[in-house]
Amino acid sequence: MPGRKVPHRRRLAMDDIAGHSSDIAESNLDSALRFLDAIEATVDMLCQFPEAGGAVPTTRPEAEGLRAKLVNGFGNYVVLYFVTAETIDIARVIRGGQEIDQIALQSR
């Protein structure tokens, strides 16, 4: 079995996480803290099991290999990532309903 992968968070992914947690904190600080913990737990799980997220269907060659995983406990949020030889490359963290491959490619 291949070794554990290392997480890499792109700047836009970190900005997404900060923005979402800030939005959540406006109404419930405890939920915002749980959201941050849930993101970290999801990324940690992806480092152990990179194929846990589903492949994102796309006709865009530059989005080939893009995967998506719902954030546990916050099913309206999705981690978008690529699997590389050594890393889980976190491209974005979005709210559900957005055009996934278009959003992820803004950071490539």
Image (tube, grey):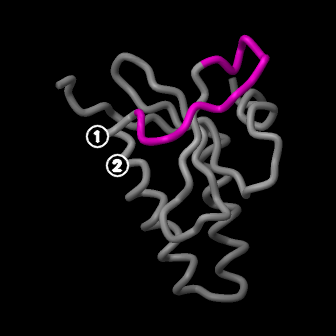
Q: How many marks?
A: 2
Find the distance from the CA under tag 1 to the CA under tag 2.
Answer: 5 Å
Residue that appears at 48% across and 76% down: 34
Which image quarter: residue 42? Answer: bottom left
Which image quarter: residue 21? Answer: bottom right
Q: Residues within 10 Å of mark 2 (few under 14, many from 20)?
A: few
Q: Position of residue 57 (x, y in %)?
A: 70, 28
Q: Position of residue 103 (x, y in %)?
A: 78, 37
Residue that appears at 61% across and 28% down: 66
Query: Disc 1 on helix, strand or loop?
Result: helix
Query: Disc 2 on helix, strand or loop?
Result: helix
Does 29 sit above or below residue 89?
below
The tag on residue 31 is none
Residue type, numbered disc 2: Met
Residue that appears at 67% across and 41% down: 12
Apparent side of residue 6 relative to residue 75 in the rendered image (left or right): left
Residue type, numbered disc 1: Gln
Dots 1 and 2: beta carbons under 8 Å?
Answer: yes
- In the picture of the structure, the residue carrying the numbered disc 2 is 45
Q: Residue furthest top?
A: 61
Where does the magenta region start and end? Answer: 51-64
Q: Position of residue 22 (x, y in %)?
A: 67, 71
Query: Is 57 inside the magenta-drawn segment?
Result: yes
Does 54 sit above or below residue 59?
below
- In the picture of the structure, the residue carrying the numbered disc 1 is 48
Can you say which quadrant of the picture contains the C terminus? top right
Between 77 and 54, the residue placed more toward the observer is 54
